[in-house]
Image (cartoon, helix red, strand yellow):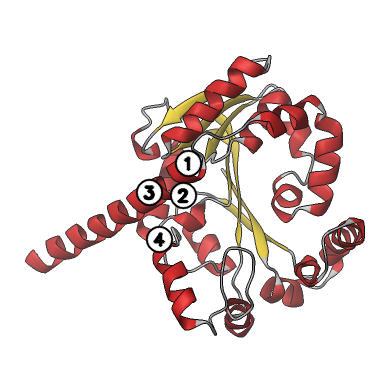
Amino acid sequence: MAFLLHLAANLGYVEDLNQQKNKEHYEKLYANFNINNIIYWINNLDSFLASATSTETSWFALYQNHFAEKIKGKKVMEMGCGDCVNAAVMAALGAEVYANDLADASGEIIKKLNDSYNFRIPITFVAGDFLKNELPSHSFDFVVGKAFLHHLTIPLERKFLKETARLLKDKGEARFFEPAVNNRILDEIRWHIPVKGRPSKFNKRAFKVWKENDPHPDRSFSSKHFEQAGKEFFKEVKTVPVGTLERFSRLMNSGESRNKFKRWALTNEKNIPLSINRPFARSQMIIYKH
């Protein structure tokens, strides 16, 4: 019994440490955030969504199957709202949006947005630890997270999914866009290719420094994991691979040629057999229902 109590205490410490690391990272990232771009995008919503949902994996994934139409007049909770772009877009589409983040800076962004734009219903910011939200059960049509779950340790993720199930209406739906790692060899190759903000693993010293400051915990991002995690709380669980072909756009220079390739890739990779698409996808859309 003493061992189990010690283990539980250690797990709690790791969770708290990870949450604090995330909070500090995003408080700094979103301090004094300029909302001008967001205001421009929601004032030109149709053109913004047409571009974002055809060229950016996260927007393409989250908004597929007519999500923009489905949320109009619906009550939506966003976990990890971050820079609040998606919260603002959903509110501008006519949803009643509640947005949560550990970072108080996100709440300041929400305040600025509500003061600067006439939403049908102002966005409600749910501050701090989402697990202490005190919102009524079965009150949301949708719960969404755009690159959010992978910031959590797996034990903490379980608590968030349990809370998601509590908040959703009986016919509600949870949608999460997350990284997908279903091929260890491909993943190891990825770590050795430098990208903006992250050095190559070949550069051991720089990579170590980056890793120490990275707010993401070491954990599984496999589709199998998210399916098994969801089945504990939901009757319907589905993962949709995204980015199998689109990942090659990273080898191209920015510009219309790259965007043209992205549009082609995201449209056509859905035709790839699942046996190939799943292990090579860069990202995934996770859907939980019932």
Gap between marks 4 and 3 measured at Cα = 9 Å
At horizontal 71% and vertical 27% (from top left) the residue drawn is 39
Visible residue check, residue 239: no
Quadrant occupied by the N terminus: bottom left
Closer mark to the observer between disc 1 and disc 4: 4
Q: Which residue is mark 4?
A: 154
Q: Which residue is mark 3?
A: 159
Q: Which residue is mark 2?
A: 233
At horizontal 74% and vertical 43% (from top left) the residue drawn is 63
Q: Amino acid at mark 4?
A: Ile
Q: Secondary structure at mark 4?
A: helix
Q: Is residue 51 above or below residue 225?
A: above
Q: Amino acid at mark 1?
A: Thr
Gap between marks 1 and 2 measured at Cα = 9 Å
Quadrant occupied by the C terminus: top right
Closer mark to the observer between disc 1 and disc 2: 1
Please tell me in which quadrant of the rendered image residue 83 appears. top right
Q: Which residue is mark 1?
A: 164
Q: Could you say where residue 240 lies in the image, as x and y percent from the top left?
A: 69, 60
Closer mark to the observer between disc 4 and disc 2: 4
First in sequence, mark 4 or 3: give its number.
4
Left or right relative to 69: residue 111: left
Please tell me in which quadrant of the rendered image residue 5 appears. bottom left
Front residue of this view, candidates 63 and 46 = 46
Q: Secondary structure at mark 3?
A: helix
